[in-house]
Amino acid sequence: MIKIFIPFQYLLLTVVGFSLLILLSGFSYKKVTKKTDKKTPSSANFYDLKAISIDGQEVSFEKYKGKKVLIVNVATKCGYTYQYEGMQKLNDLYGNKVAVLGFPANDFLYQERGSNEEIAEFCETVFGVTFDMFEKITTKGRKQSPVYTWLSDSSLNGWNDQKPTWNFCKYLIDENGELIAFFDSKVKPLSKEITSQL
């Protein structure tokens, strides 16, 4: 009985160890390929996109040609809502180089329930927002905004499939309409990761 039990125990440990090794090597492979992905020119033109401003006007993204563009999915009831202040300061300091665009979305824990009018009033009253704000949209799923479809589909933008993981994720587009970076919510608007690329 002992002779049968010990080999089975070793076999079980070997299988578990081998499975963990495969799992861990899979994670490291993903990290390496993510860092070494090569960007290709986007197949869909960023400047062909349009969106509706928070006051109901259609805006063609052609108006942003020659500037970098920072697109942020915003919410008024989020732990990162304070980043509106940083977005406004970024606009004030680097407005000649970058256009900051805010897209309210109610995609994460219902943290943007207000109407466009309520959102606009909040942004102006609390943070003195003067950068371009757009009507409330959806950043993922069946009703995803065309802007966010472009931002999170590598077949359109050339390399990135990352959708927003939470409110205040950031996408940076260069002066030629090419997506060059994605930043998660923790990266603040005035961080070196962003300002060094302006």
Image (spheres, grey):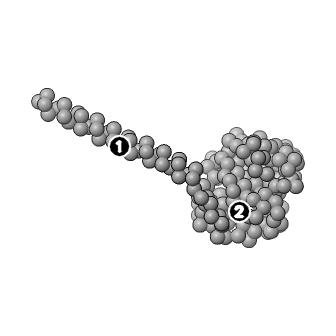
**Label 1 or label 2, whichever comes before in sequence order:** 1
Task: Name the foreground residue: 161 vs 32.
Answer: 32
Q: Where does label 2 land, which residue?
A: 178
Q: Residues within 10 Å of mark 2 (few under 14, many from 20)?
A: many
Q: Residue at x 70, y 40 (%)?
A: 79
> In the rendering, at what x and y percent does residue 38 appear?
59, 58
Q: Residue at x 62, y 60 (%)?
A: 39
**Which label number is shown at residue 46?**
none
Place residue 56 in its image quadrant: bottom right
Q: Where does label 1 land, which residue?
A: 19
Place residue 157 in its image quadrant: bottom right
Residue 29 showing in the rendered view: yes
Residue 179 horizontal side relative to residue 23, left or right: right
For the N terminus, which image quadrant? Answer: top left
Q: Amino acid at mark 1?
A: Ser
> Is 168 placed above or below 140 here?
above
SS of the residue under disc 2 = loop
SS of the residue under disc 1 = helix
